[in-house]
Amino acid sequence: DAKTTQPPSMDCAEGRAANLPCNHSTISGNEYVYWYRQIHSQGPQYIIHGLKNNETNEMASLIITEDRKSSTLILPHATLRDTAVYYCIVRASSNTGKLIFGQGTTLQVKP
Amino acid sequence: DSGVTQTPKHLITATGQRVTLRCSPRSGDLSVYWYQQSLDQGLQFLIQYYNGEERAKGNILERFSAQQFPDLHSELNLSSLELGDSALYFCASSVVAENSPLHFGNGTRLTVT
């Protein structure tokens, strides 16, 4: 599975959009981009995943660049409860299923 | 609520002891995964089971073992415990489909004294 690079930390004002970047320049054609978050010592929570088209669900939007070398997770209206560590993970569709977590981005939403 | 249930929530034990952590996957999920999260290591994949069979192995110590039972629940056994085994242990489950996400439980916090 390709390696990802994320900034270690970010701040966002409450009510504003939080845009979390992820670089995955070595991604290959059969690899999906997944986003999870972990709120203080709770289990990681699935947010969204995609291959090459932009995806949106009730939690967030995932924007993947045309060359697929980077992506951005967008939380449209961040709240204090969105403060968490956000993980961007690349996983091959042929993978047995496991996810390999990196260090993630700590997002602090401030009032 | 992810639908994955882990018990117990907290466990305190002494060095040299053995413990068993239990995981009930979401209804319909055939794959179960175990992860360890300690302060200095992040989330580390330990092992995966699919329908009772071991499917993938990660950084799991020989002192640790797991199994998945016919009713699909899984147990992680940790023996000869050391102080460094203190960590959060998470279980996750998924359906058997390409690109299906994993859903995690809220973990068992193990403290070895």
Image: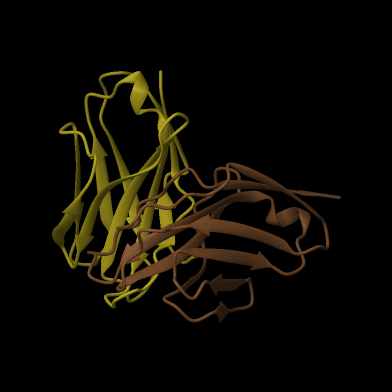
Viewer-closest of B89 and A48 = A48
Viewer-closest of B113 and B35 = B35
Q: Is residue A19 above or below residue B81?
A: below
The quarter of the picture where the N terminus of chain A appears is bottom left
In percent of width and height, residue B81 lies at 28, 24
Residue B1 showing in the rendered view: no
In percent of width and height, residue B12 lies at 43, 28
For the point 51% across and 59% down, which residue is it? A36
Task: Name the tint of chain B in the rendering.
Answer: yellow
- Identify the coloring: by chain
Q: Residue furthest front?
A: A67
Left or right: A7, with A78 as reference point: left
Q: Which of the 4 quarters of the picture holds residue A75?
A: bottom right
Tally of marks: 0
Q: Is residue A12 above or below residue B112?
A: below
Left or right: B110, with B20 as reference point: right
Q: Which chain is brown?
A: A
In percent of width and height, residue A20 lies at 62, 58
Q: Which of the 4 quarters of the picture holds residue B71?
A: bottom left
Q: Which of the 4 quarters of the picture holds residue A26?
A: bottom left
Q: Is residue A107 above or below residue A17?
A: above
For the point 63% across and 71% down, which residue is it? A60
In percent of width and height, residue A50 lies at 45, 75
Left or right: A3, with A18 as reference point: left
